[in-house]
Amino acid sequence: MFIIREIIRAVRITLVLWLLTAIIYPLLILVVGQVFLPAQANGSVMVNIDNQPIGSALIGQVFTSEQYFHSRPSTVRYSQGKKARPTGISGASNLAPSNPELMNRILEQANQFRDENIQATADLIYTSGSGLDPHISIKAARQQLERVARARGIPENEILPLINKYTDGRFLWLFGEPGVNVLRLNYALDLQEFNRKQN
């Protein structure tokens, strides 16, 4: 009799914990996210002037054109092209520092920047731990300023305010370093060019 009561009690506790942790808590977080932070809860997806998704402001993307600021390299290839959609894929290479493949990738990236007369800062040649980081340092953005201005045919002082505008500060004013959100910056440059052509 005692064992049966204890088994029933254990089953009840398990069901209550399951109800709290698997149903009530996730629903509460979903409701709070959708009501108070809907953009962030839905992936911070950015859309262009045609209301088409162009990427997430939280996930780094590859930019290869000279007209764009390049983001951190990533071992993950994100969705690209005209019908690109954020894939949600994340990951790192997991290559050891002694792995020749890692060294070759870093040297290739550094040589590419040297050919472009850009001083290769750490965040331009090393991937982030998650492979997702959408930011580059202010120094890395300024290193690319001349190239982007030349490719777009505009003076550098037209781009500097955008770099400042899309620089995110330290987390909680304490943690990390300020960083420039590359997707937001590049899209702002496209909008600036679009508006210039309209006028």
Image (cartoon, rainbow, N blue to C red):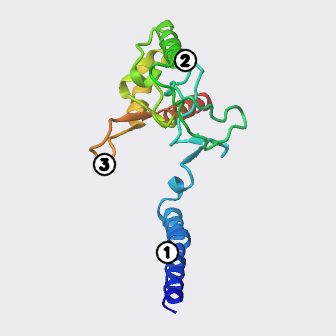
Q: Nearer the viewer, mark 3 or mark 2?
A: 2
Please report whichever mark, 2 or 1, sits nearer to the chain's N-terminal start. 1
Q: Residues within 10 Å of mark 1 (few under 14, many from 20)?
A: few
Task: Identify the element where label 3 is drawn.
Answer: loop
Task: Identify the element where label 2 is drawn.
Answer: helix
Please report whichever mark, 3 or 2, sits nearer to the chain's N-terminal start. 2
Tag 3 near tag 1, CB within 8 Å: no
- Where does the C terminus fall, quadrant-wise? top right
Q: Which mark is residue 41?
A: none
Task: Identify the element where label 1 is drawn.
Answer: helix
Which quadrant holds residue 87?
top right
Pointer 3 residue: 172
Amino acid type of the residue that numbered disc 1 sits on in the rendered structure: Leu
Q: Position of residue 20 (x, y in %)?
A: 50, 74
| For residue 84, above or below residue 74 | below
Check the image and name the residue furthest to the left.
Answer: 174
Q: Nearer the viewer, residue 75 or 36?
A: 75
Check the image and name the residue furthest to the bottom.
Answer: 1
Amino acid type of the residue that numbered disc 3 sits on in the rendered structure: Leu
Amino acid type of the residue that numbered disc 2 sits on in the rendered structure: Glu
Please report whichever mark, 3 or 1, sits nearer to the chain's N-terminal start. 1
Give the Cα separation between the discs numbered 3 and 2: 37 Å
Q: Residue at x 37, y 33 (%)?
A: 164
